[in-house]
């Protein structure tokens, strides 16, 4: 049995809904920064004269290894620190590293910045899921997780529609800088 007196009270329904909405947006950004290269690989390959193995490191092996290995210490940190602050810090890191990818003068800098994206993203999932678990009792948690998970298809939709258009008009670097909802004037 769980002693309810020792647990912190759950926020009001409206506050939980707002937090869940923010976590949905966080997940959308996390997945978007994870998949954005999928529509930008050819122009990146052309600019840096890359081969398929080098592209694979950017989107696969090195990136996934960094993300996977870093997820464990982030999971431990989630249990021991302020999750809101950790989620904010992770968002700042992976967004900043995505911007650095856009400014990379060569492949090595791009690869290192991409690893930084994976490092920042490694904390986003565990942090969000932990917050949702605290906010929603088990009878409502599956619905909350489903809403949070809608960030993945939302990111795919943004990537295949908006980011392709931004890349077409402003190049791959512009698409990385603009991100979701980024607006630029065409001069």
Image (cartoon, rainbow, N blue to C red):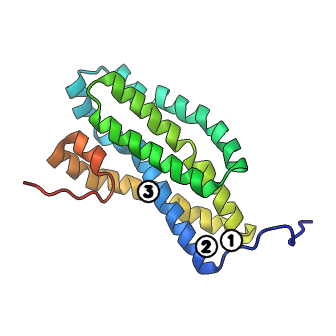
**Tag 2 residue:** 16
Q: Which residue in the rendered view is the most extreme toward the left?
A: 187
Say if 17 sits above or below 175 in the image: below
Disc 2/disc 1 C-alpha distance (Å):
12 Å
Q: Where's residue 131, x and y in %? A: 65, 60
For image coordinates 28% across by 21% down, the residue present is 50
Q: In this view of the protein, can residue 81 be seen by the observer?
A: yes
Hey, which quadrant is residue 42 in on the image? Answer: top left
Q: Sequence order check: which comes first, mark 2 or mark 1? A: 2
Packing grade of label 2 (10 A; few <14, some 14-19, many >=20) is some
User: Which of the two discs, 3 and 2, sits closer to the camera?
Assistant: 2
Secondary structure of the residue carrying tag 3 is: helix
Tag shown at residue 140: 1
Disc 1/disc 3 C-alpha distance (Å):
22 Å
Hey, which quadrant is residue 176 in on the image? Answer: top left
Secondary structure of the residue carrying tag 2 is: helix
Q: Quadrant of the C terminus?
A: bottom left
Query: Relative to the observer, which residue lies in front, 139 or 99?
Result: 99
Tell me if label 1 and label 3 are in contact, CB under 8 Å: no
Task: Judge from the rendering whether residue 74 lies leftward or rightward of residue 101; answer left or right.
Answer: right
Packing grade of label 3 (10 A; few <14, some 14-19, many >=20) is few
Q: Sequence order check: which comes first, mark 3 or mark 2? A: 2
Query: Relative to the observer, which residue lies in front, 24 or 116?
Result: 116
For image coordinates 64% across by 62% down, the residue present is 132
Say if 78 sits above or below 150 in the image: above
**Tag 3 residue:** 153
Say if 12 sits above or below 45 in the image: below
For image coordinates 58% across by 45% down, the residue present is 123
Q: Where's residue 80, x and y in %? A: 72, 48
Tag shown at residue 116: none
Disc 3/disc 2 C-alpha distance (Å):
22 Å
Query: Relative to the observer, which residue lies in front, 153 or 92?
Result: 92
């Amino acid at each position: 049995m769980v002693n309810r007196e020792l647990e912190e009270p759950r926020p009001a329904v409206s506050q939980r809904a707002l937090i869940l909405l923010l976590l949905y947006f966080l997940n959308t950004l996390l997945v978007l920064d994870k998949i954005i290269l999928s529509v930008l690989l050819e122009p990146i390959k052309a600019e840096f004269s890359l081969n398929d193995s080098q592209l694979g490191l950017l989107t696969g092996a090195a990136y996934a290894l960094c993300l996977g290995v870093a997820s464990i210490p982030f999971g431990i940190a989630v249990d021991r620190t302020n999750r809101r602050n950790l989620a904010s810090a992770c968002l700042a890191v992976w967004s900043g590293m995505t911007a650095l990818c856009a400014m990379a003068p060569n492949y090595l800098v791009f690869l290192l910045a991409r690893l930084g994206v994976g490092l920042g993203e490694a904390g986003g999932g565990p942090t969000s899921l932990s917050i949702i678990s605290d906010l929603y009792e088990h009878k409502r948690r599956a619905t909350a997780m489903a809403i949070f998970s809608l960030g993945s298809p939302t990111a795919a939709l943004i990537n295949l529609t908006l980011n392709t258009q931004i890349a077409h008009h402003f190049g791959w670097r512009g698409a990385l800088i603009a991100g979701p909802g980024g607006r630029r004037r065409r001069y």
